[in-house]
Image: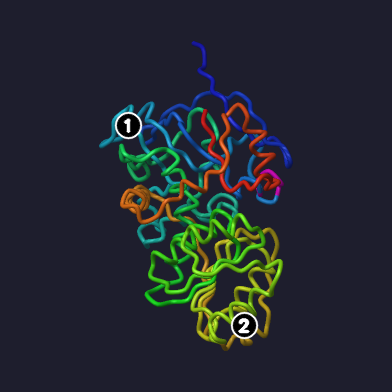
């Protein structure tokens, strides 16, 4: 019997993700096989490409799938083959200790590579991902969310990771009505954090970046003020805008020591630093901005919430026209051209924010 093959973007070695052929996955009892209709490249995939985040050689990369159910496992109920669905980047089982403690994103943390297992992030991390013609979604009944007929693939493409992560940066920090919030870095996650802060009731949202196109997009996503950190000291400007008070919440969305420091220095006493960035090296907490540990600050971290209910809620926000993230798709590629897409995205050329990949 001939094994069915598919095209897939495969991690070969640091600096090399290539398009090659692999067998179409076999479907287990609780799994669903999706025919991928649209996916994208994440900043975390670039960390993988550069060798800054370790994954197994030969792994299919990608964790943001929109697709159609090709085949269902024998025990899967409540879904139909041919149904259009989205799956979160984080695919919790629903029954682990982490899930039952209400932290579904940490399902599986520490079980495979220590903290490098990155909680419930399996697709493109510990199992084959979705930059391919087909992807196998585990625990399908916990993870597949039907896409409303009136929403396009590109409208929901941010739900699996970028939207869920960015919004959770505001949610985890407890952004509330009347809060002042600064979001450091207006890449895709930072832009979603900006939108999430505004939706959470913040009265002042400040977007910080160095690129004019991203600052313009930050305004489109709800920022009341934007700061070009290549021209002014962003912390000094935040203090001016808040009349010396500092912000209630600073969201760090880049993953560098410099932006972490600035986020901490921008806080009011007792404020919250919400860390969303993926860090490649150890962080140092500066003594002064941290108040020698006596400033009543909170530092909170977040891994992208997943699961079908999270996806349903995010799509409901889009369907209700509370936010439109489709403008963040700035470039489109066929799967056949994914190596060129990686070259563009990893070098941040031509004003790229997110790319849509269609097999």
Q: How many marks?
A: 2
Residue segment shown in magenta: 47-51
Residue 243 against residue 174 in the figure, above or below: below
Query: Which residue corresponds to the image point at 67% horizontal and 44% vertical from the top-left?
Result: 350
State the image coordinates of residue 102 (x, y, percent, origin top left): 37, 61
Crowdedness near tag 1: few (<14), some (14–19) or many (≥20) residues, C-alpha within 10 Å? some
Query: Which residue corresponds to the image point at 63% horizontal and 29% vertical from the top-left?
Result: 337
In front here: 31 or 211? 211
**Residue carrying label 2:** 290
Between disc 1 and disc 2, whose residue precedes?
Answer: 1
Crowdedness near tag 2: few (<14), some (14–19) or many (≥20) residues, C-alpha within 10 Å? some
In front here: 357 or 26? 357
Residue 138 against residue 23 in the figure, above or below: below
**Residue carrying label 1:** 83
Query: Which residue corresponds to the image point at 36% horizontal and 39% vertical from the top-left?
Result: 140
- Magenta span includes 241: no
Mark 1 and mark 2 in contact? Answer it, CB < 8 Å. Answer: no
């Amino acid at each position: 019997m001939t094994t069915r093959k598919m095209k897939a973007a495969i991690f070969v070695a640091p600096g090399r993700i290539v398009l090659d052929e692999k067998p179409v996955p076999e479907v287990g009892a609780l799994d669903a096989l999706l025919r991928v209709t649209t996916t994208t490249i994440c900043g975390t995939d670039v960390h993988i490409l550069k060798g800054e985040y370790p994954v197994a050689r030969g792994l299919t990369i990608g964790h943001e799938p929109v697709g159609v159910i090709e085949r269902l496992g024998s025990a899967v109920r409540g879904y139909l083959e041919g149904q259009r669905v989205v799956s979160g980047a984080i695919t919790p089982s629903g029954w682990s200790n982490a899930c039952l403690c209400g932290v579904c994103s940490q399902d599986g943390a520490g079980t495979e590579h220590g903290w490098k297992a990155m909680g419930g992030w399996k697709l493109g991390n510990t199992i084959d991902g979705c930059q391919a013609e087909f992807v196998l979604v585990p625990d399908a009944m916990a993870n597949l969310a039907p896409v409303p007929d009136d929403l396009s693939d590109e409208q929901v493409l941010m739900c699996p990771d970028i939207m869920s992560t960015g919004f959770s940066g505001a949610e985890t920090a407890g952004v509330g009505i009347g809060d002042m919030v600064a979001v450091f870095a207006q890449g895709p996650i930072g832009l979603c954090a900006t939108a999430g802060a505004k939706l959470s009731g913040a009265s002042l949202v400040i977007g910080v970046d160095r690129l004019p196109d991203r600052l313009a997009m930050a305004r489109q996503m709800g920022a009341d003020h934007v700061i070009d950190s290549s021209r002014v000291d962003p912390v000094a400007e935040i203090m001016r805008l808040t009349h010396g008070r500092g912000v209630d919440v600073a969201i760090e969305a880049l993953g560098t020591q410099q932006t972490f420091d600035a986020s901490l220095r921008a806080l009011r006493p007792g404020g919250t630093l919400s860390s969303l960035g993926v860090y490649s090296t150890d962080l140092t907490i500066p003594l002064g901005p941290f108040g020698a540990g006596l400033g009543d600050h909170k530092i909170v971290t977040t891994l992208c919430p997943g699961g079908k209910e999270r996806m349903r809620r995010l799509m409901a926000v889009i369907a209700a026209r509370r936010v439109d993230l489709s403008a963040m798709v700035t470039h489109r590629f066929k799967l056949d051209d994914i190596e060129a897409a990686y070259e563009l995205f990893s070098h941040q050329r031509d004003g790229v924010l997110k790319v849509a990949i269609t097999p």
